[in-house]
Amino acid sequence: MQTIVVPGEKLSDSIIRIQNSTVINGKTYSTIVGLFSSDKNTLIPLEGLWHPAYGDTVIGIIEEYRLNSYVVNLNSPYKGILITKYVQDQLKKGDLIEASVKELDKTKTVVLMRSRRLTGGKIISITPSKVPRVLGKGNNMINEIEQSTKSSILIGHNGVIWLKGGDMKLATDAIFRIQEEAHTSGLTDRIKGMLTSGS
């Protein structure tokens, strides 16, 4: 059986000698976010995985209605749950929503709040760990893209991005370029040049 584990989570009540783990008082704990197999005693790192935190903004798709709640696909190993009594919009399968994280429950389900339905536009996804680079310091990078392309852009901490209006192709190209070159210096100037030239 495979489960997602987070740093500090107990893997076993006994000692297991595997990478990315630590042993405390004869018990084994994970030191990373990863995929743990209790059958094979393997722990695979999940690079760039989004780990939900209170207040995170996410963008997801309604998968189904179940037991007075909506199940939301968050483009991650975590499922989202939206309780209907907190939902203002009438939602159906396939609807796109923006919401905030209320908590991560014991079953590793993300409980969502403050949702709103998004209409039109399109979505793209990036590695969640690159979201801060796309936003930029004080949101300067994403503001630059919005102003130059006249697109409305919402970025989820889960790596899902919604774009609507304006030059969505240029905005998309800029976001993907930031993802690819996030580790390089001088990126802000290159993106500004790209937006100015339109290519």
Image: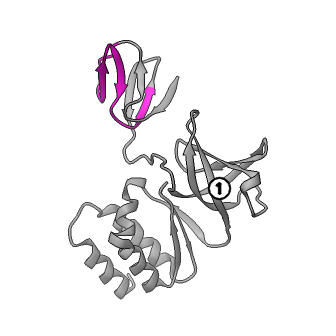
In this rendering, the answer to whether 20 lies above or below 176 is above
- Residue 196 painted magenta: no
Q: Pick whichever, 170 or 70, lies toward us.
A: 70
Residue 22 falls inside the magenta stretch: yes
Question: SS class of the residue under badge 1?
Answer: strand
What percent of the width, then of the height, locates residue 107? 58, 33
| Image point (71%, 57%), residue name | 94
**Residue picked out by circle 1:** 61
- The residue segment tinted magenta is 15-36
Say if residue 77 shows up in the picture. Answer: yes
Would you place residue 100 above or below residue 80 in this image?
below
At a point 41% along the width and 14% down the height, the residue shown is: 13
Point 33% across, 81% down: residue:
194
Left or right of 78, for residue 16: left
Q: Quadrant of the C terminus?
A: bottom left
Q: Residue at x 47, y 17 (%)?
A: 39
**Visible residue check, residue 18:** no
| Front-lying residue, 112 or 156 | 112
Is 85 positioned to the left or the right of 38 in the image?
right
State the residue in front, 2 or 154.
154
From the viewer's perspective, is residue 15 above or below residue 131? above
**Which amino acid, by three-letter code, is at mark 1?**
Ile
Which residue lies most toward the left here?
Answer: 185
Q: Position of residue 43 (x, y in %)?
A: 38, 28
Q: Position of residue 122 (x, y in %)?
A: 59, 69
Picture quadrant where residue 40 is located: top left
